[in-house]
């Protein structure tokens, strides 16, 4: 039996790393708006999708396509569409299957920006039904004949709740509903949602995929296995001839193309080369995060949330779905907002910034920033308590990070 290729080897040597026109080892940056053709007939065929080719970068670009193929291969999908941001990716993905009068089920412990987006969905006539917990039982109870998708985060941010993908997908599929999973905080290094039962995977590539904090972007990966019922999913009926590929075809040639939320070629290039080190970065980040979480958990006056800590609510799920690793985010509570701010302001190495997935350790007070427009109930459901600090752990020497945080905590009792 042929030995299975390791993550980093696959990342650097699989087919997406080959086949560039001039034998480059990286995709060239096609920083152009349009592509010329020798005849009007040839361009017509490209516009009709009867011939392969690129016409206009909003619709398709070689550099962006190279990045799409790379992430699609990592996730094991049939097609991937890169967008200008993670929010653009979520928007395009869900509007591909839902229209006015339809419903989407979502967990309450979502990223604050996603919750804000869903308020705009309500204005478009798409009702978002929030589950107190995204479990098999809850999903079964909430699904109606108007439900068009279940949307959840694989690892919540900053709640760090871990989604039981096999059970939730089974519950959704029993009612003919697909499961869309935002896997930004997990990355393909920790988990492959499509293999676990999800139908569509979404990433904010601005985070761990890029890794350097230099390019906003998002991507949608279609698993290509969901049996679409075009009487239920009316938004896809004009694409019914594509069968199980109806979602990805409509996404690419309709919603995403018309909304104009394309990824810039330079951003695609920077995220492509950033992904080269995804495995190495995540290995170091996860190791640092667990060590920092354990050190803080043994520090008086601190309550730490990290998936793999002994007795953590999602410890067993993290073992099953994340390979026993907890990811790069941890959160800790310190008793009051005032104390949280003092600790943040006392840190030497950790930077106060709103991103995650950077090489550098970043910290933030989620309740007053990311969840600024959310109710107290929504904030607390997401783990954004008034006294909570979220940490996106970087690749620094972990002893320096531990000293930095423990000293800041002890100095501000």
Image (cartoon, grey):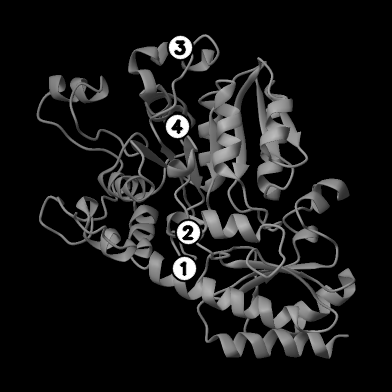
The percent coordinates of residue 118 (x first, y second) are 69, 35
Residue annotated with mark 2:
190
Sequence-first disc among 2 and 3:
2
Viewer-nearest of labels 4 and 2? Answer: 2
Marks 2 and 3, how far apart in space?
A: 35 Å
SS for dot 2: helix
Viewer-nearest of labels 4 and 1? Answer: 1
| 2 and 1 marks in contact (CB < 8 Å) | yes
Marks 1 and 3, how far apart in space?
A: 40 Å
Residue annotated with mark 4:
256
Which image quadrant: the N terminus? bottom left
| 2 and 3 marks in contact (CB < 8 Å) | no
User: Quick check: can you spot residue 83?
Assistant: no
Sequence-first disc among 1 and 3:
3
Sequence-first disc among 2 and 1:
2
Residue annotated with mark 1:
282
Marks 2 and 1, how far apart in space?
A: 8 Å
Sequence-first disc among 4 and 1:
4
Tell me: 339 left or right of 150: right
Q: How crowded is mark 4: few (under 14 residues within 10 Å), some or many (20 or more)?
A: many
The percent coordinates of residue 384 (x first, y second) are 78, 58
Marks 4 and 1, how far apart in space?
A: 30 Å
SS for dot 1: helix
In the rendered view, would you say 2 is above or below 378? below
């Amino acid at each position: 039996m042929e030995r299975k290729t390791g993550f980093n080897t696959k990342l650097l040597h699989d087919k997406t790393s080959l086949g560039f026109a001039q034998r480059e080892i990286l995709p060239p940056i096609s920083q152009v708006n349009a592509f010329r053709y020798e005849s009007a007939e040839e361009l017509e065929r490209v516009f009709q999708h009867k011939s392969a080719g690129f016409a206009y970068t909003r619709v398709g670009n070689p550099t962006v396509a190279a990045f799409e193929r790379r992430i699609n291969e990592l996730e094991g999908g049939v097609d991937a569409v890169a967008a200008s941001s993670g929010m653009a990716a979520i928007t395009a993905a869900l509007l591909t299957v839902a229209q006015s009068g339809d419903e989407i089920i979502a967990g309450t412990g979502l990223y604050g920006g996603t919750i804000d987006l869903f308020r705009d969905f309500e204005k478009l006539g798409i009702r978002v039904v929030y589950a107190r917990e995204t479990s098999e039982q809850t999903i079964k109870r909430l699904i109606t004949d108007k439900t068009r998708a279940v949307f959840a985060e694989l690892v919540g941010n900053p709640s760090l709740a871990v989604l039981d993908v096999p059970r939730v997908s089974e519950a959704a599929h029993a009612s003919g509903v697909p499961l869309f999973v935002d896997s930004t905080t997990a990355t393909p290094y920790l988990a492959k949602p499509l293999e676990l039962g999800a139908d569509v995977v979404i990433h904010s590539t601005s985070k761990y995929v890029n890794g350097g904090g230099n390019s906003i972007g998002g991507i949608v990966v279609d698993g290509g296995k969901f049996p679409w019922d075009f009487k239920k999913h009316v938004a896809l009926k004009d694409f019914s001839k594509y069968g199980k590929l109806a979602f990805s075809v409509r996404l690419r040639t309709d919603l995403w193309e018309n909304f104009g939320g394309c990824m810039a070629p330079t951003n695609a290039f920077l995220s492509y080369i950033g992904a080269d080190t995804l495995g190495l970065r995540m290995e170091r980040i996860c190791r640092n995060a667990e060590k920092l979480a354990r050190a803080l958990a043994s520090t008086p006056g601190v309550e730490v949330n990290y998936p793999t800590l002994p007795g953590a609510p999602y410890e067993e799920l993290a073992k099953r779905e994340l390979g026993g690793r907890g990811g790069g985010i941890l959160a800790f509570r310190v008793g009051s907002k005032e104390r949280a701010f003092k600790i943040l302001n006392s840190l030497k190495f950790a930077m106060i910034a709103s991103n995650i997935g950077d090489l550098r350790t970043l910290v933030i007070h989620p309740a007053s920033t990311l969840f600024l427009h959310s109710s107290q109930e929504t904030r607390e459901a997401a783990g954004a308590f008034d006294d909570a600090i979220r940490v996106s752990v970087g690749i620094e020497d972990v002893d320096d990070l531990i000293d930095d945080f423990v000293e800041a905590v002890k100095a501000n009792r």
